[in-house]
Amino acid sequence: MARTVTEIYNAALAQKEATPELAALTSTSKTALWRLWLWLVAFVTATHEALWDEYAKDIEAKGRAAIAGTVAWYHSRVMEFQDGDTLTLIDNVYQYGVVDETKRIVKFCSINEVEGSLYIKVAAADGDGNPVIIDGASYSNLDNYLNFIKFAGTRHSLISLAADKIFMDLKIYYSGVPYSEVSANVFAAIVSYLSTLSTKHFNGALKKAALIAAIMDVDGVDDAYFSLLQSKQGDNAAVGIDRETIAASGYWQLDGGNQITSTVNNPDGSITTSTDGNVSITYIVS
């Protein structure tokens, strides 16, 4: 582990104090030439050690991925898939003759090994970098690619689905901040949580408590609770989310999209906003 500049400087200073030949260097000024040289050497050394740490991490990651047949190896191979291209035997390794990033359509991948079978969940990305389904010929090409590269006897299931939808009926109690500001920021917090989970933690668990925490961080929000929170994949029935759940597709979208399309002023003074789908948020002054 790399040492800090201060740690290295102090170690060098201690060595200087223990060296009789350097006893004449007694200035306490931070701009003393010998102190500046010590600091310069400490800075360069700390930078060098930090670079070695990063290099070691990179080598370790490459080493894990290089061991053929591991989950990390399969993950690397899936990310290298080039839609429409054919693998060629080069230097005794099947690979693409030309690397073409425009054909590497897999942008998100999660692999789980269960009882000897690999469950490979993948998605491409839209123009905004959000996960989208891989289907049609591209799905078939990827599945054939996996059949070609996998080890004999290895079973796999390739999964690529449209986004799992979130249904919600949310109650927000707020004070001290105008409704227009609170409502905009609450909705943005929800969208941001789902987007981050989908892109940076593909196939990660949606946690009800974490979503509520993101909402509670909004200035002016005093309390928040779900009277309904469900997930739905495709034509399957919606399922309640008790504590946490993982999207069958690996990523999430609000039902009806990321835009409020309806605002209703209720008789009791509360205001309910909703998307074009099964997402409604009611704001109540505390």
Image: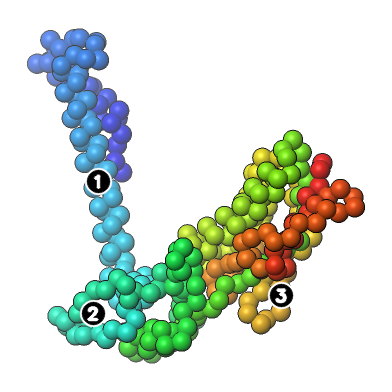
Q: Which amino acid type is shown beneath numbered disc 1? A: Leu
Residue 275: x, y in percent? 69, 63
Q: Is residue 156 visible?
A: no
Q: Residue tagged by mark 1?
A: 51
Residue 255: x, y in percent? 66, 68
Per the model, the C-alpha gap separating discs 3 and 2 is: 42 Å
Q: Residues within 10 Å of mark 1 (few under 14, many from 20)?
A: few
Q: Residue tagged by mark 3?
A: 238
* Quarter in which the C terminus is drawn: top right
Residue 245: x, y in percent? 63, 67
Residue 35: x, y in percent? 20, 19
Which of label 1 and label 3 is nearer to you? Answer: 3
For label 2, the SS is loop
| Tag of residue 96 | 2
Per the model, the C-alpha gap separating discs 2 and 1 is: 31 Å
Do tag 3 and tag 2 residues touch (Cβ < 8 Å)?
Answer: no
For label 1, the SS is helix
Query: Considering only vertical position in the picture, is 132 above or below 19?
Result: below
Per the model, the C-alpha gap separating discs 1 and 3 is: 49 Å
Q: Which amino acid type is shown beneath numbered disc 3? A: Ala
Which color scheme does this rendered protein use?
rainbow
The residue sitting at 34% across, 81% down in the picture is 83
Do tag 2 and tag 1 residues touch (Cβ < 8 Å)?
Answer: no
First in sequence: mark 1 vs mark 3: 1
Q: Is residue 193 left or right of residue 273?
A: left
